[in-house]
Every structure is written in structure tokens, then in C-alpha cells.
Amino acid sequence: MRMRLTVTAFLVAAAVSLSAQGPDRSKPPVPGPAPTLRVPTIQKQKLSNGLPVWIVEQHEVPVAQVNLVVLSGSGDDPVGKYGVAALTSSMLTEGAGTRVGLDLADAIDFLGADLSAASSSDLSAVRLHAPVARLADALPLMADVAQRPIFAAADLDRLRQQRLTSVIQGRDDANTIAALAFARTLFGTTHRFGTATTGTAATLRAFTVDDLRAFHAAAFRPDNATLIVVGDVTAAAVLPLLEKSFGSWKAGSGPVTHVRQPAPPARARREVYLVDKPGAPQTQIRIGFVGVPRSTPDYFPLEVMNTILGGSFSSRLNLNLREEHGYTYGANSFFDMRVDAGPFTAFAGVQTDKTAESLKEFFNELTGILQPVPADELARGKNYVALGLPSDFETTGDISRRLEETLVYALPDDYFSRYVPNVQAVSVADVQRVTRAHIRTDRMAVVIVGDRKAIEPGVRALNLGPVNIITIDQIFGAN
Amino acid sequence: MKLVIAGCFALLLPASLMAQPAAPLQLPYTQFTLPNGLHVILHEDHSTPIVSVNVWYHVGSAREKAGRTGFAHLFEHLMFTGSGHVAEGEFDTRLEAAGGNNNGSTENDRTNYVIDLPSNALELALFLESDRMGFLVDSMSQARLDQQRDVVKNERRQSLENRPYGVAEGQVLTELLYPEGHPYHWPVVGYMDDLTAASYDDVVAFFKTYYAPGNASLVLAGDLDSAQAKALVEKWFGDVKAGAPVGPITIPGVMLTAVKKQTITDRVQLPRVYFAWLTPHALAPGDAAMDLVGYVLAGGKNSRLYKRLVYDLQIAQNVVAYQNSQALSSYFLIRATPQPGHTTDELQAVIDEEIDKLRNEPPTDREVQRALNQIESSFYNSLERVGGFSGKADQLNHYYTDTGNPDWFNEDLSRYRSLSPTDIRAAVQAFLPRDRRVELTVMPESTPQP
């Protein structure tokens, strides 16, 4: 935010005055060399109990982000306890230390801070965002939440009811239905990734506070955790505060254990799964397969390929289904890469009377990407991925999330400084290689949520494969 | 991308400061106006090598004519389809090839456009932005209009008809709040028939009337050199032709004189109830107080409605309350969904009871201070980002539009800091009468699942 006066400014101004007639619009400006992102230095320290601390100084705004990340998430939910990680995390802020939930919320809100806890497939985290002037007051509350949750039975019953109600409400939303149907179709009902992160009505009903305590004890321990600090702090100033709040946290007994997921069921042929949503003016489409883990050596070629296929506004799917045909407000695709292989999903909400036409165009693009990608399209895709990196390093929250990624997936220390060259190294041949390895259009699951009466004949006429009818009751189970 | 924001569902000013003896919050900027009337604001922030190019056109759905609702937003879509010197599709491909992102949004009162990209590509963004400001209709065609019409109809299906409670929230609510003919009566995204009726001639006329540089303001924020950026703006926007001034909007006076009650059905499992009141327009006396009323009623677990309905009685799945600030007229909204087995009438009884309490007795000092501290923090948080719809560039344009002063952060914060608990009570007394409001209930079409 500093002003910079330079001599070049005057030179530029003089040059411009010569072209007062208006610029030559037939020659669009060509950007000069891209600026290099100064990848923030990560200061790696340890507290006296061995808890690792990563600190990135960012002195732009007087705020700080502090994330306590544990390397256990919903992927570690034991069979039969699906949803326990997510529910445990939610319960952390419902009372901790000497404060019941309302007192805790009052204290945090009064500091102008934000404190939350959540689980995803590979991690659970307690995240604090606070004015730096309030950090010393907020950290002890955060430490209570992570280390000393109360897990009161009455609070569990309240959250349980809210989640059961959310399951009921999920039936209203074609997006939710499609996401659950797609997960179930790819992974099956016994694999963790085949049901919602938050669990099912059946598991939610069965959870006891002992389940939460067990997950908390196994996951939230300093030898399974890292503190990530980003903001207007110095290591010298913040480390004593962290030591005070987290330094006496005792390691758990025995080694940390993780649940590994079984291989998902193999798919021998393409199949269609149709869910009836009577009267729906749009059909939600999900097409895909079980993709790759985050550790895939093909990470960069896959990201570039997906950017071209469905990962940007000018991607093939969006240009075709939205801009050329007007069937949808947007068509996209993405790889959800986790410790274990997550799904690849191509998706859109399309108008009901264009459902079959849209499916046809989806497969046209999924087939078309198997051909060599033109050089200019590849260059655009690579630039979009590579040059967009700085925008992920703007806010303390953004930076902390990128650090979480490097932590959870054990990315190398030079990951971000090597990021741009790694993207730019992707060749036409690389894209074609990974496309042929992964995009198997004859083995995809095609999930369609829409007005069956209106769309079924057209869908069947496409002959994409066997058409299975799934009911909403099957997807959500008994309430 | 290119989404419609039908009214802002957040606080008008995402902003904030710290409750302490906070240093004045200042954003250094320079500004100038081109001979063609375009107002330009520059702000330097070199912390990340990106810049944001942010344009506000001072036109939104409130300017639409009868039979052409949704046109301002449909027009927004056309702004991405190419212009006199930018071939169809090139607006996006050129920006993406430079590592940039772009988007636009339409509200009742304004339409904004955002380009965020690496700082080396600033001039490319200025070329593209100026070309569509100056030469959009040079390459416009019936086919482009037809194509975006289909996209926008799908946007409407996605955000209203196919979204649970979407029609109630995105359409019926404002139809009840504002009388026919009032410019906030219809949905920003428009009615299907009106979208069908939009013509090529409408596009040309709208462009000439509302997209002149004098009806716009441009903010450049981020990793830029102000002198150099000014020269580039002069270079690319200097030849955009000036247009006729746009006069102020005239509206019929609007007030509710009774309870307007309506029940509609939707394909949902649970009912939902909305209460809405007409309230002071953005920045008018009472506007900030109503923001605080929103906090006291439903901001956080200790807020009065959340605590009673969700925490203590456990008869609601959720409750939301906020002041939706707009230029001509605002509204205050409370929305609550009962738990299965409970009714909207039960919720209404508690909601009315809690409003009555605030009508009779001011909130506690701690409740007000807690809200102020959260608001102050939100001001700081908003300074972390340069671009997008919530970054500094957009806020500078927002403040400039509303007050003529881009750096109005401190003044805005002062609006909140100057309020006392009795001001909150007074606002509830004045603006949340029980006998003059909208009561909208959504009932499930069929029996809820067991």
C-alpha cells in the first residue's frame, strides 16, 4: 500500500500524449514477463512438546490466521461410524474448557474473532481468524476447543437433530441428491467415500458422546498435528503465545493409526443412474469415475488437461454446453484428489428438455479430449493454472489453506517455487498420455437427477448403457 | 461466472475495524475524471503481484421498463461476448491466457465487472474493458442475444425454480414488499416472458443510455504504479465517446400500511416463514442501526432469536435476520425454518416476542459492543483482498458511488460506533411494526417425508 513514484511514469505519460487520437485497437497489448510470486517463507519451529509450528509472516493487515490441523479426517471414520469425524469437529465449539457453548461463542464474538472446527476426508482442523491485537486472548479459547472439548450429551442431541433435519432437507435439492447418488454409485455404500462426510441418518442416530471422545482422543494429539500461523505476527512474538496454549498438550499413547480405504469397486461398463425429481425444470448431470490420489505423478498434466476440458470459463465443456448451446448456466469438471483416490466429476444443471442433447455433448467433449490438444489451447490452459498461483496467496486464509495442502499431502518444501515450471513443462504428449490412461468413456457412471417422465425416453434413446432407476429413499436411507 | 446477485444478502458494507483505540483506517488513493466523464480511482497495494480492474455502471434492474424485466442482467451477460475489436470468445480466452479471472454481477442499483489478473497484464485488461465500454454494439448480433438469453433462462431455473425456496426468496418476497411499478418489485433476473421479449434494439438503446463513461466509475487496485496506470487509462479509455447524462431515478413513495400475508407452496420437505419490513435506504439514518438489529437478533449463537429458537427451544433448524441495504429503499428480513413436527406459527410467536422485548427495552451494552467488535473485524478482513466482488477495489467503487468519497471506511465505521443501545431500541420501534410487514410462508407441496 505504499506509493511509488518513478521516473518511468513521466516517460510513459509523454509517450501516451503522442497517441491522443486513440490507441490502435487492432493490436491488443501483449503482457510482458509474468511477475514472480515471492513464495512466502515458511518458518518451521516446534513447541516444547514437539508440536510443529509453521509460521508465515504477512504484514499487510493487522490480522492473523491460526489453524491447528490434525491428519485424521472423515477418511478415518471407522466402518459403521461414518460421520463421526465431522460430528466430533462440530462438537468442539459446543463447549470446551470451563465454558459451555454459548459462553465460548460470546467470548470469541466479543473479540471480533472467528473460530471454527471442521473435518474433510483427510484432515480435521480448528481454525481461528482474529485481529492480531486479540490473538493473545483468543488462542487460549482455541486451545480449549482443540484439547478440552466438553462433549455434553445435550449438545450432541441438539446437533444430531439439526443434522437429521439437514438430511431431510437434502431431498429438496437436486444438487445434493446428485452429489450423494454419484458418490454412492462410484464407491458403493460400504466405502467411506460412498456416503456423505456428515454421515447418514442411521449413523447420526447411533452416535454417543463416547464415539466422539474416542475419535477426539485418536485424532487430536500433538504427534498428529501441526499449527499453521499466517499473518501480521513475528515468530519471536507468537511462539511464546503458542507455547503457553499448546506447549503442555500431552502426546497420546501408542502410535497414531489411520484407516485405509479399500479399493473401490471396479466398473466394467458405462451405466446410467436416473433419479426421479418430479417437476424439476432442470436436470442435474454428474459424469465420472474413480480418479486419482493426490500423490499421483500425473498431477500437473491432469490439472492442465482438466482446465482445458472443464476447469475454466473457456473450457470445452462450458463453451459447448453454455456458450454454444445455451443448455446450462455452466458446465465444469474437476478431479477431487485425496490421500486415497477421489472422484473425477463432470457436471452441469441443464434445462429439462435438453437433457439428452446435453449428455450427447458431454460425451462429445469427453471423447474429443482424447485427441491431441492444439498448442494454443494447451498454452492457454497452462498459463491459466500457472499464472493464477499468486491469487491463492493473497489473504491469510488463502495462504493457510495452501499450507494445509502441502502439510496433508506431504508436498516438498520447494513445491510452490517449482509450481510454475512444473505446469509449464506439461506437453501435448503428456496431456494425451494422462487422458488415455484416465478418461475411459466406456466405463463411466452417468448420474441424472431430473423429471423422469420428461427425460427418460431421450436418455434411453442415447444407448449410453444400462439405465438404473434409483429412488431418493435409496440415496438418503430411512430418515 | 457472470452471476446475478439479487440484492446483497450480506451486510451492505462488508467492512470493519477493531473495537480498540483503533488507528484510523485509511486507504490511500488517487482519482481523476477523463474528459468523457469516466471517473477513475487508483489504489496501490504491492503485497501480491496482482491487479484488479473494477467497473461499476450506475444502472441495475431498477431502470428496467415494464415488459423487459431482467434486461440489465441479460445485458451484463452480453458484455462478455466480444466487442468492436475483440472477437467472440476472446474476452475470456485472452484473460485466461494471461492467468486472469473475470466476472460480473447485477443488482437493483448497479452492475459491476471485475477482472483480476497478474500485474504484468494490466494493459490487456484495460484494452478489453475499454473496448466493451466504447464499442460493444459494433459487433453485437441477434444470435449473441439469443444465445445469452438461453443461458440466463437457465440461470433463472438454477437459482429460482430449481432451488428450494428459490421462487419465494428470489421473487415473491419483493413482489409483496414493493407495489407494482416500483423498480424493486420484480426480480433482478427477470421474468421468463420478459427475457423472451428482449430485442436487439433494446440492447442498442440500453447501451447508449446507460453504458456511457459518464455513468460509470473505474477502480484499479493492486500492484500498479499510479502514474503509469493513469497514463494507460487515458490511452485506452480516452477515445470512448461521452454520452448523455443519466437523470436521477424517480420512484413512487413506498410504504406498507398493513400486514401483507401470503402462503405459497414449493417442492420442499419443511415449511419456512419470512417476515419483511421496509426500512431506511442505504446510509440513511436508521440503516446502520438496522444492521445492528440484525446482529442482536440473529448474529451468532448468543443472538436472541438463534438462542431461543435453535439453542433453547430447539424448534427451528435455523434463523437468519439482516438489513438488506439498497439505494432507494431497504428491507429488513427475518427467515426461519421449523424443525420437523413444529410449525411456523410457533416460530412466529417467539419472533414477535423477541422483537417486542427489543421494542420495550434496549439491548445490553455487551450485545451492542459484541456486534460492533464483529463489524470492526469484518472491516479489517475486507482489506485482505484486492479483487473479486468483496475486495478493496469493489469497496472503493461502492463508497465512491454512494458517497462520492472512495475512502469512506472510517466514516462508515463511525456510523456504527456512534450507536447506543437506545438507538437500537428506537430503530426497532420505528421500523419493525408488527402491523405493517410482509408475512410470507412456504408450505410443502406434499406431506413431508416421515
Image: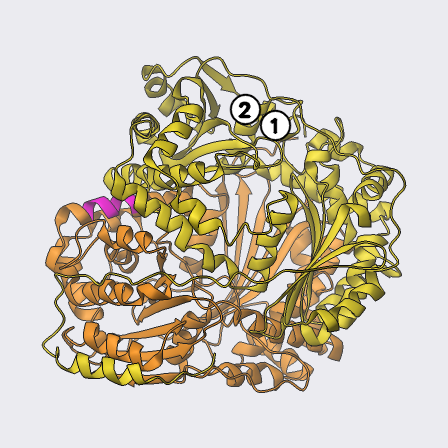
Chain colours: A yellow, B orange
Using residue A273 as the reference point, say whether residue A8 is left or right of it: left
The reply to whether the magenta stretch includes residue A70 is: no
The one of B341 and A377 positioned closer to us in this rendering: A377
> Is residue B254 in sight in this rendering?
no
Kindly identify the residue that appears in the image at 87 percent across and 59 percent down. A97
> Is residue B414 in sight in this rendering?
yes
Instruction: Report x, y in % for residue A382.
Output: 37, 46
Q: Which mark is residue A186?
A: 2
Precedes in sequence: disc 2 or disc 1: 2
Instruction: Report x, y in % for residue B252.
Output: 33, 73
Amino acid type assigned to the residue bearing label 2 in the image:
Leu
Neighbourhood count class around disc 2 (C-alpha, 10 Å): few under 14, some 14–19, many 20 upward: many
Kindly identify the residue that appears in the image at 72 percent across and 32 percent down. A82
Neighbourhood count class around disc 1 (C-alpha, 10 Å): few under 14, some 14–19, many 20 upward: some
Q: Find the distance from the CA under tag 2 to the CA under tag 1.
A: 7 Å
Chain at tag 1: A
Chain at tag 2: A
Local SS, label 2: helix
Label 2 in the same subunit as label 1:
yes
The reply to whether the magenta stretch includes residue B146 is: yes
Q: Which mark is residue B434?
A: none
Instruction: Report x, y in % for residue B333.
Output: 54, 63
Instruction: Report x, y in % for residue A192.
Output: 66, 29
The one of A128 and B193 positioned closer to us in this rendering: A128
- Vertical position of residue B427 compared to residue A437: above or below: below
Asked whether the beta carbons under mark 2 and mark 1 sit within 8 Å of each other, the answer is: yes
Kindly identify the residue that appears in the image at 40 percent across and 78 percent down. B43
Amino acid type assigned to the residue bearing label 1 in the image:
Gly
**Pointer 1: what residue?**
A194
Local SS, label 1: helix
Start and end of the magenta stretch? B145-151
